[in-house]
Amino acid sequence: MKTAKRLLSVLLILVMVAALVACGGDEPTTDTNTGSQDVQKPTTNTNTNTSGGTENPGGTEGPKEPAWKSWEQKELSEEDKAAFAGKNYIIIQHSQPEDPFGYSQDSLMGASVADRIVQVQDKYGCTFTFEFVKYGSSDFVSAIQAKQFAENAGDLLYINNNASVRRVLGTGGDSSLMVDLLALDDIINFWNTDKWGNISCRETMMAGGTFYGVSPALWTDATPLPFYQVVYNRAMIVEQFGATDPQEYWEKEAWDRDAMLDVIEACYDDSMGEPIVGMVGGPVHMVRATYLTCGQPLAVIKSINQDETVDWECGLLSPDAIEALTWLKTALTTHAKNIIINDSWENHQKVAAGQAAMAVTRPQGILNSSTSIVTTMENFGLTTWAGADANVLSGYYENCTSISIPLFAQDWNQSAYLMYDLFEGMDGIETYEDVLKYYRDTYFDTDLDMTMLVRPGTEFQYSYWPNGCDSVWSSINANNLLSASSVKTLIEKAAATTTAGIEEHMVPNKVALEKYRQNGFFE
């Protein structure tokens, strides 16, 4: 067991959460920046014998509804609204300025985005300018850091790959160049996961237990999607090889390792020269997918102590994790001719080309690219990498499109109002159910296809790969597993390389999330 050092950040987390969920009157106003009005966090419902505003007839204390469930936006006074007029607000993005929010203006979504921009500009009497900042980590960090000393340097960040933003979050607090969004939750309904993404993807923009960004989850092309799903050629599996459709196993609650290996073993043919194989995946991707099904997060919080220390363990060292990766080594050895290790992000193309029955892939291998499955083949299906237990849903959030407010924005409150209005859903998409319907109608043949890829995602993890928690998988990888004399020793050596990243970046966030969960802020 590891005991984290006594971190100031953990103390701040506990103080922040205690204040947020305490019963009582209004919290004091919090100054933001010198150019903005005071912002105030909403109070928690203090009525001890009501539930949702209805008196409890039994006279006993009923459950209190969290204030955010009955959230109402703080209305702008005419004076405050007039302060927007004539201003230009700069939106920093990874895409070129001529493509607002990354959408080509001649695309269908681009037209909707352009309309939205005009609507918001008209509402507030302001204008928007889009500014390109290069994605590369060092370039992005230096560009954003330089802006903190400039005038009118940027009012919102819209970033398609938020790994770069993590590098300007640091460990949170004074090291971050982004605004704590909970300080603005009387303007932004922060806990509306339909609009701003589930808590697992929200973690991609946490640092030191503070939330610095959200995702435009109602923008269908930006909806957070998990990594390491399995795409398969339904026609090949069922018609060519006479094997069972993986989704049929799923419907019978029987999709486990044995079922997956049965399909893999059935789908092999070397009669035409280049063999058709059952499964292809990257050496790191198969290791990650196998680990995810064992049910252990990388950082397992054991206890939060009164002296502000945290006891935690590395989940990679758990018996379940060692068993899962030992199974993978055995499967790769036993089925060597039929489970092919190929270090590529494009393994889904082998499924589309009829060279493999199944492949481990990322969201871009399924959607949103010119070579994705939905654009290159028709009779495909989606499932998950199978675990020891049947029907395990799992996945990682690597990157999510993120929206944040930089500390150097002209006025944090004004940025929050603009952000709230800009990222309403498009074209009748108002709830997450609408998002699911869109994906089902547009891309998928079965409800299960959608279930595997587009879902609330509370069972997903965030990998913290920009913060040093990614090297562990590269150290283990499938090739190293095959050559290791001891799987347990290989895992222990790899886990040691990620201890600092877990303690510095993961633990403070996990502690804060657990406090919010205990106090009913999300399910």
Image (tube, grey):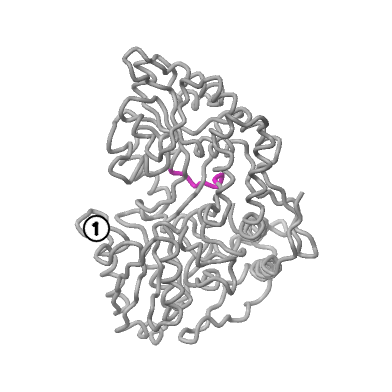
Secondary element under disc 1, as helix, strand or loop, is loop
**Viewer-proximal residue among 261 and 477:** 477
Give the mark count.
Answer: 1
- Quadrant position of residue 362: top left
Instruction: Specify whether residue 63 is in view.
Output: no
Specify the farthest residue to the right: 306
Q: Residue furthest left?
A: 106
Give percent across and percent down for residue 136: 40, 60
Q: Identify residue for label 1.
A: 104
486 shown above or below 6: above
Q: Position of residue 129 (x, y in %)?
A: 29, 73
Please state if 450 lies on the left or on the right of 127 as rendered: right
Quarter-of-image position of residue 381:
top left
- Boundaries of the magenta span: 454-460
Q: Nearer the viewer, residue 117 or 323?
A: 323
**At x 69% / y 68%, what residue is drawn?**
18
> Residue at image x 61%, y 65%?
208
Amino acid on which disc 1 is placed:
Ser
Image location of residue 409, percent across then percent down: 43, 78
In the image, residue 100 above or below residue 253: below
Visible in this render: residue 112? yes
How packed mark 1 is, by other alpha carbons closer than 10 Å (few <14, some 14-19, many 20 or more), is: some
Q: Is 171 inside the magenta-drawn segment?
A: no
Q: Position of residue 2 (x, y in %)?
A: 75, 52
Is 438 on the left-hand or right-hand side of 507?
A: left
* Helix, strand or loop: magenta stretch: loop
What residue appears at the point 67 percent right and 71 percent down from the top-left corner? 19
Q: Residue at (68%, 31%) from the top-left corner? A: 486
